[in-house]
Image (cartoon, rainbow, N blue to C red):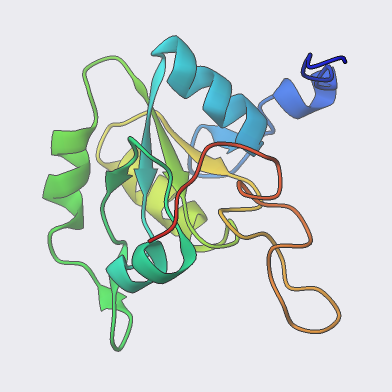
Amino acid sequence: MNTATPPTPSSVLQVLPATGYAGDVSPQLAFQWVQSGEAVLIDIRTDAEREWVGYVPGAVALAWKQWPGMALNPGFDEGIKTAASAGKKVLLLCRSGVRSVAAARRATDLGLEAYNILEGFEGDADERGQRGHRGGWRLRGLPWQQG
């Protein structure tokens, strides 16, 4: 029985250019950077999203917007500066890779080397409006837990 992990295409391990922050990265590259100690992963979803949908073990939980109402988290700036270890890249993860763009731009404004994780935790909605079938951290088979 072959238990080896299939090779990851090199295109998945590239940083894509972005405006206002360091770049966009695939979930696979983000995981590689975290595993090598190059980066810190910051999950910017709400507490409810992490609790009900799942979370990445070891990620820093720091909401960009707060539930209910989705108002900007007034503690985000201080929280991300605290979470970002000196010299490490900052990887931002949200549900689908949209909110994390805004958070990456803010982190960059604060002087951090910030990256958006493409596809987010759940990926895009499919034709039935359901997430988890079109990309995302979970679908890519990367570590996560629920409950």
Q: Is residue 106 above or below residue 59?
A: below
Is 144 left, or right, of 80 in this rendering? right
Q: Is residue 17 above or below residue 8?
A: below
Which quadrant would the N terminus be assigned to in this image?
top right
Q: Could you tell me which residue is drawn at 56 percent across and 43 percent down?
A: 117
Query: Does residue 31 appear to the left or right of 56 in the view shown?
Result: right
Above-or-below relation of 114 to 120:
above
Q: Nearer the viewer, residue 65 or 5?
A: 5
Going 69% across and 63% down the picture, which residue do you hit? Answer: 132
Q: Position of residue 44 (x, y in %)?
A: 36, 56
With 110 as the anchor, is 120 left or right in this view? right
Quarter the C terminus occupies: bottom left
- The picture places residue 46, in percent across and down from the top left corner, at 33, 68
Query: Toward the viewer: 20 or 93?
Result: 93
Image spot of residue 109 (x, y percent): 31, 43
Q: Residue at x 56, y 54 (%)?
A: 121
Q: How many marks?
A: 0
- Is 8 above or below relative to 67? above
Write down the quadrant of residue 30 in the picture.
top right
Which image quadrant for residue 49?
bottom left
> Which residue does the image show at 53% across and 37% down from the upper left?
143
